[in-house]
């Protein structure tokens, strides 16, 4: 029975010392997460990749996504330490002013009380400032010293992956996959159908290629299958840290049976999907602890992670530290919202580039060209609104509350919906 239904059984694949029959594929998020981990963990991970480079493979689609997204990931962390210290200083000043105001509310109208009140406020300010400076010089600095935001490891990673990237598909091949993807997604055949809602209408325009982003995972999968068809490949290990890839794997049970079956039928190779922590532990038998804090649960792990911010536990230090913690959360919300705005700006800029390209290079009927010009006008207007909101956010970041951020988020979600509609209409205009 096992022979007839091999896709429902998990096979053990040797990773610590694999032979040439094992192919190791790294997902886009794994490559980008190299910039989200500490210096020592980054070195350990790259050392492991160095030792396994003969087995590594990067589908062209994954390599392209990595290079297109790398700079935005790097920019996230360039100013995070200075931003945090600046906000904590502002919050401290606000906290001192509130203490002074509260003390001033006491209805005692004598000179000695007034003088003593000023003395008390001065002492509180000195002690709070001293404590904050001590935290900056010690615990908080130690926290950020773990992370190196200045070093770009792309050169070393590029050397490790030299010659490991597969070929690109031609535009006609991509369009065939996208057509097949429509049928697969309609029947929820993995992978990629989970991206349909959030990425419909989004385009990647690069090197004369126009790729509908909702089919990015499917294109990557087909490129993995192509590589796995090579006669010496007997096992494919796909390493991903994306906890939302429910259309790739079952939580704590590994790769989806449909994918394992498709791999077996088309290449006669086994498919295993694991997270970075399991990959590291299996690649290095001496490593027993999780090095990465990314949420991924495969059949070998139980790790869960929230990677949106560094959280400092201050609850035990009283109301002041609670306020600092709240400020840290506010800063995290600010950076999330700013990233969202920048991503939307990037999306609408891609739309504008695509429109410009088709206006200049593709023959169209007059009616279609007029529609294209209308899309161009609306797209430029949306980009202008996004730029204004981003500037407003940056100029008022120290004044805005989480409630304010939520209000701005609601406004830009309307623009996000408009972008999706334009992209869908544009795709229909181009391809239909």
Image: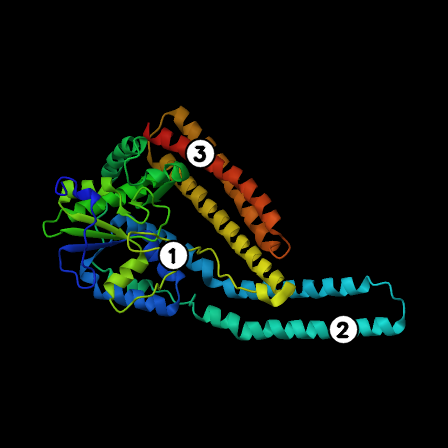
Q: Looking at this view, is 248 or 365 the one in front?
A: 248
Which badge, 2 or 1, comes first in the chain's sequence? 2
Q: Where is mark 3, residue-wise?
A: 422
* Callout 3 touching callout 1 (CB < 8 Å): no
Residue 288 coordinates in the image, percent (x, y): 30, 66
Left or right side of 422 for 257? left
Which badge, 3 or 1, comes first in the chain's sequence? 1
Q: Quadrant of the C terminus?
A: top left
Colour style of the rendered protein structure: rainbow
* Callout 2 touching callout 3 (CB < 8 Å): no
Residue drawn at 27 percent across, 68 percent down: 47
Residue 222 coordinates in the image, percent (x, y): 22, 42
Quarter where residue 301 is shown: bottom left
Q: CA distance from mark 3 to mark 1?
A: 34 Å
Q: Disc number at residue 294?
A: 1
Whether residue 159 is visible to the viewer of this picture, yes or no, is no
Dot 2: few (<14), some (14–19), or many (≥20) neighbours within 10 Å? some
Farthest residue in the right direction? 110
Left or right side of 37 for 93? right
Q: Disc number at residue 120?
A: 2
Whether residue 128 is visible to the viewer of this picture, yes or no, is yes
Residue drawn at 43 percent across, 69 percent down: 146
Dot 3: few (<14), some (14–19), or many (≥20) neighbours within 10 Å? many
- The image shows residue 118, relative to residue 342, as above or below, that is below
């Amino acid at each position: 029975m096992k022979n007839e239904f091999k896709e429902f059984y998990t096979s053990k694949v040797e990773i610590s010392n694999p032979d040439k029959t094992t192919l190791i594929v790294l997902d886009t998020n794994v490559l980008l997460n190299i910039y989200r981990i500490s210096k020592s963990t980054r070195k350990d991970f790259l050392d492991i990749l160095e030792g396994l480079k003969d087995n590594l493979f990067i589908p062209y689609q994954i390599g392209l996504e990595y290079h297109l997204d790398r700079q935005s990931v790097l920019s996230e962390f360039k100013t995070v330490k200075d931003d945090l210290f600046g906000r904590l200083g502002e919050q401290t000043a606000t906290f001192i002013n509130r203490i002074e105001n509260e003390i001033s509310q006491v209805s005692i109208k004598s000179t000695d009380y007034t003088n003593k009140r000023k003395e008390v406020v001065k002492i509180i300010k000195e002690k709070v400032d001293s404590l904050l400076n001590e935290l900056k010089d010690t615990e908080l600095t130690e926290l950020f010293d773990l992370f190196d935001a200045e070093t770009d490891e792309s050169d070393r990673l590029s050397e490790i992956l030299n010659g490991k990237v597969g070929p690109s598909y031609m535009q006609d091949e991509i369009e065939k996959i996208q057509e097949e993807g429509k049928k697969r997604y309609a029947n929820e055949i993995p992978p990629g159908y989970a991206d349909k809602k959030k990425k419909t209408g989004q385009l990647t325009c690069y090197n004369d290629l126009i790729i509908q982003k909702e089919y990015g995972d499917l294109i990557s999968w087909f490129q993995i299958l192509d590589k796995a068809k090579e006669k010496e490949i007997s096992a494919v290990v796909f390493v991903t840290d994306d906890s939302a890839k429910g259309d790739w794997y079952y939580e704590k049970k590994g790769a989806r049976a449909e994918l394992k079956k498709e791999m077996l039928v088309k290449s006669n190779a086994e498919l295993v999907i694991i997270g970075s922590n399991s990959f590291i532990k299996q690649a290095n038998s001496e490593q027993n602890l999780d090095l990465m804090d990314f949420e991924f649960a495969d059949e070998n792990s139980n790790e869960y992670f929230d990677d949106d911010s560094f959280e400092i536990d201050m609850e035990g230090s009283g109301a002041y530290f609670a306020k600092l913690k709240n400020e840290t959360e506010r800063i995290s919300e600010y950076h999330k919202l700013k990233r969202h705005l920048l991503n939307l700006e990037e999306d609408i800029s891609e739309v504008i580039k695509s429109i410009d390209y088709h206006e200049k290079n593709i023959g169209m009927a007059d009616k279609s060209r007029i529609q294209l010009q209308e899309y161009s006008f609306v797209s430029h207007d949306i980009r202008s609104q996004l730029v204004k909101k981003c500037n407003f956010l940056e100029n008022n970041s120290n004044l805005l509350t989480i409630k304010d951020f939520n209000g701005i988020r609601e406004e830009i979600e309307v623009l996000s919906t408009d972008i999706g509609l334009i992209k869908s209409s544009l795709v229909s205009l181009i391809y239909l």
